[in-house]
Amino acid sequence: MLLEILFGSQTGTAEDVSERFSSMAQSTGVECRVQSLDSVKSIEDLGTHILFIVSTTGDGEEPENMRHFWRLIMRRSVSPGTLSHIHYGLIGLGDSTYPKFNYVAKKLSKRLHQLGAQSICERVLADEQHPHGIDGCVDQTFTGIFWQAFGELIGRELKPRIDQRLPSKYQIQWIDNTEQDLPSLQSSVNTPKIPPGYSSIPLISNTRVTSDDHWQDVRLLEFDTDLPYKCGDVAVILPQCPLPVVNLLAELLNVQNKLHQKFIASNDVSTLSMTVLELFRDYLHITRVPSRSFFEKLVWFSEDERERERLLEFLEAGNMDDLYTYCHRPRRTSVEVLQDFPHTTSRIPFEYVFDLFSSIRPRSFSIASSPKIHPNRIQLLVAIVRYKTIIALYREGLCSNYLCQLQPGTHILMRIATSFNLIDDNRPAIMIGPGTGVAPFRGWILERSLNNEKLNMLFFGCRYRNKDAYVEKDLLKDTINLIYIPAYSRDQEDKIYVQHKIIEYGHLIWEWILHKQARIYLAGSAKQVPEQVSDALKTVFINNGHMTNEQADDYLQELERTKQYQRETWS
């Protein structure tokens, strides 16, 4: 009996949950296979028993590794009843503070029902805002129900065990490098391997564009590359974990003397070859806040009575608050957890690092340059993620801080991906880009200004004109054809945001839409900005187009349907 677990994951959370359910399945003796949804090449590849685990990204979009599958099941040739042989469970992962909460899971559920698939149990739409996070939400509303229902379906009682150590994902073979030259091995410190699809790109400059006394550090990074791109594309970057944390983990796992030693990790489907340094720095996300499965796997190796008792207490159903308070509220990292359980950590076999840590996920940044204005250059606007937790420790975003510390001449791993469909025609463009949401518009405005007949309007939002209005230096020039409407939220007593400016200049927006068929583009955080901007646009339609609320709703939906209004948002 095979249980297929198919995931659609953008940041790795859905994959982590998939691996956790795979471990549960294996502990009950159920054969299990975990794959991304895009590994399904045809409808015929789908098995009989499937657990779907999917997240939602951006403005209600499918994760990148699910898009092929979604197109596959949405084909007109796929008729009702095609999936009637399938019994499935469904876990959606989302955040209820975003407007399109779990949108992908909802539409997948609807499509599976249309095609005749039969649900094993009621789906769960897990919420990051749940008092116990994603894991707590899934466990309280789905896990036990699913295994009971699946067991009844296949005629077996299924009771997953967390204390049963499973075989490691990979087997390790160390390579003797005593005869190799140590300096050549240590050169790997600055030469990460290049994965398929990526290029090694040198940094030219790394400039802070916000004032030194401003709370937010925003960088303009410029790279030398002949990679082809267009305005609206994103640079996909593979970051590295910081070396101090790499060295600390090596010490905790007693492999500090093997940092430069090569090994081969292999299983039935893949083989990896690298040094310990490359593994910890370039491959595993060792600074991530660990999920519940991390603690479940630590139990496998814990023989110290006090540490084992504490781990098991964390994992009891009634103690979810304790685990959440210990781990998620202070954003405690995986390595910091290992420090708190030294006896258990010292007993972890090296081959199990692949089971404990997930792989580093690439990060995408909107390109802020234009290939026509900046030939052989790619520029990025990056806001550095840095904050203090409730235990007064500073936390840093992995990729933004990796980029922040780069010195000119350093090479990074990058590839280009299509993202925002900025339509290059003669119709006026109304652009709304608060903060670093302005990035895709920066290069595009410069490019469009090569043609004086192209009209451009930009709504830009920041806190202070003198501290973080970093686009003004580039865009407020006589040669740039632009109507610039800023919202400086803290330069006066009453806070003013882009949505307020949209309403204030509603007459001009309405004139451009009604008489010039202007296109509207929004880029920024997916959390509150899309809804606030939508409300402001509807107010414009009501005040200037003399519409009712219902008519304004319908009009905005029609603009979206015809691509006259487009949004590029991110979590």
Image (cartoon, rainbow, N blue to C red):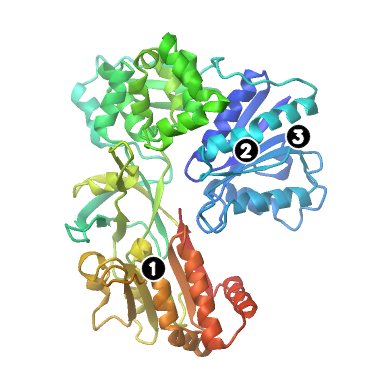
Nearer the observer, disc 1 or disc 2? 1
| Residue that badge 1 annotates | 433
Q: Position of residue 460 (x, y in %)?
A: 35, 71
Q: Position of residue 96 (x, y in %)?
A: 54, 51
Q: CA distance from mark 2 to mark 3?
A: 12 Å
Provide the secondary structure element on which disc 2 rests: strand
Q: Judging from the image, what secondary structure is the residue with disc 1 in?
A: strand
Q: Answer left or right for 153 relative to 316.
A: right
Between the C-alphas of marks 1 and 3, the distance is 46 Å
Q: Select label 1 or label 3 by which is in front.
A: 1
Q: Earlier in the sequence, mark 1 or mark 3?
A: 3
Image vertical order of residue 471 relative to residue 324, above or below: below
Q: Quadrant of residue 44?
A: top right
- Left or right, 494 with reference to 3: left
The total number of labels drawn is 3
SS under mark 3: loop
| Residue displayed at 50% across by 29% down | 292
* Looking at the image, residue 462 lies above or below residue 235: below
The answer to whether the residues at label 1 and label 2 have Cβ atoms under 8 Å apart is no
Residue that label 3 marks: 48
Residue drawn at the location 50% of the way across and 56% of the way down:
58
**Which callout, 2 or 3, points at the residue further toward the start of the chain?**
2
Q: Name the image quarter holding residue 548.
A: bottom right
Residue type indicated by callout 2: Leu
- Name the amino acid type tagged 3: Thr
Evaluate whether residue 89 shows in this view: yes
Q: Quadrant of residue 470?
A: bottom left
Within 10 Å of disc 3 (Cα), the crowding (few <14, some 14-19, many 20+) is some
In the rendered image, the vertical position of residue 310 relative to residue 186, given as above or below = above
Residue at the location (45% across, 87% down)?
Answer: 507
Which residue is denoted by mark 2 in the rendering?
6
